[in-house]
Image (spheres, helix red, strand yellow):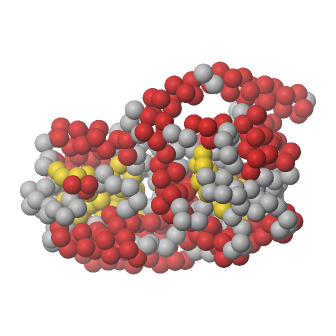
Amino acid sequence: MPTLRLLLDWSLYRLALLLAAPLIPLRLLWHGRRERGYWQHWNERLALGPAPVTGALWIHAVSVGEMRAAEPLIAALRDAHPDAPVLLTCMTPTGRATAESLYGDFAHIVYLPYDYAGSTRRFMRRLRPRVGILMETELWPNLIHAAARAGVPLVLANARLSERSAHGYARLPALTRACLQRIAVVAAQTDADAARLEKRGAASPQVAGNLKFDITPPEAQLERGAAWKAKWGPRPVLLAASTREGEEAPLLRAFADRAPSEVLLVLVPRHPQRFDAVAGLIEAVGLPYQRRSALDGAAMSVKTRVLLGDSLGELFAYYAACDVAFVGGSLMPLGGQNLIEAASVGRPVLVGPHTFNFEEATRLAIKAGAAVRVSDAADLLANALKLLNDASMRARMGEAGLAFAARHRGAAARVAGLIAPLLADAGAGRSRPGPRG
């Protein structure tokens, strides 16, 4: 019976891929209207063209958050294996831009091919990585099957599986189990993640902690944020970071109705293709605003009520410049974003009711006194104004955030230790890097 179920799951998955094939170029063209990066490097999405490197440490991080979370692990692996080339793959242009900014001076960066059998076999045959590290829970059946056939050991690093995601994987239970059983090492973030992954088929998942605790705020960005705050003057600053569609409009209405005129709202959408749409939302509520991109070398007007953070790679600077930080993706049922970064800068954190993608980190932050959960935009603004009017409460929450972030560090060393035996088994005999491409 398990074999029959596996055949059925494979058939359903392959049928879904077949039906999706004609839509892929249309999707790339459509998204490319707002983000031109989708129109580039199409050959890589089919594993075509020259191989940029062979025999590398391969890390796959689907987009921005995963690419940034990989930073401490990549640093630990480079310290332990300084001569090994590094290959990074991603799926989105923003993920690629993040990889270029963080690792472009040493890593080879390409798109991961779509999960078609021919493309994944070509990828493994041409690049022959020593080990593959999949950040969080990226289970692509054909990719995993191709890696197994090519003898490339795979690691799930920073692995997480929410209840919602577990139910999704349960739709193809035999295929999910077959994929997880081919993963050599599963390094889960929490006990709950490990239990859910084991239930779905992972063999002996290890609890290594969350790599995002190991990310150190870049000193240059902290200095940049402090400089911004000095230029903005003594105004209280509320940051709404990594906001998603459906969150900005109610927040802006609440801010326009209830916030004192001296409070500055810094609004940083999660996705750059939405910058213009969010600018339209600000205009619709009639709040005077400026764009971060227009402030280089220019002063902020005293009439400005909202600063639109339309820049990439400056999130730590925004945290350093604010007095209170709301972390978005949590007012809507989207799972939330990473609140650890705000806490690590020592800022009081507000989150909405929907944080299932960061369930354990959010629970621990609230328990530590570093974060407060709010129910909606009106509740968010009420709590933010309360904090902005209470310097001692902000200081207590900020100190609790620093302690919370420091207490849970160490995942990078633990995950690197789990990977080390796989690299030893792979040996040093694989091909050395080819020319950069």
Residue closer to the observer: 172 or 137? 137
Q: Is residue 394 visible?
A: no
The quadrant of the rendering that contains the N terminus is top right
* Residue 130 falls left or right of residue 59: right
Q: Which residue is depicted at the point 35% across and 49% down?
A: 269
* Residue 110 falls left or right of residue 328: right
* Residue 160 falls left or right of residue 312: right
Q: Position of residue 245 (x, y in %)?
A: 37, 40
Q: Position of residue 86 (x, y in %)?
A: 66, 62
Would you place residue 18 above or below residue 381 in this image? above
Residue closer to the observer: 285 or 102? 102
Q: Which residue is depicted at the point 53% across and 57% down?
A: 99
Q: Is residue 399 visible?
A: yes
Specify the quadrant of the image occupied by residue 420: bottom right
Q: Which residue is outermost to the front?
A: 435
Q: Position of residue 21 (x, y in %)?
A: 63, 25
Would you place residue 390 above or below residue 162 in this image? below
Residue closer to the observer: 281 or 79? 79
Total labels: the figure holds 0
Q: Which residue is depicted at the point 41% across and 59% down?
A: 313
Would you place residue 172 above or below residue 190 in this image? above
Residue closer to the observer: 225 or 46? 46
Q: Which residue is depicted at the point 63% across and 67% down?
A: 73
Q: Position of residue 133 (x, y in %)?
A: 70, 57
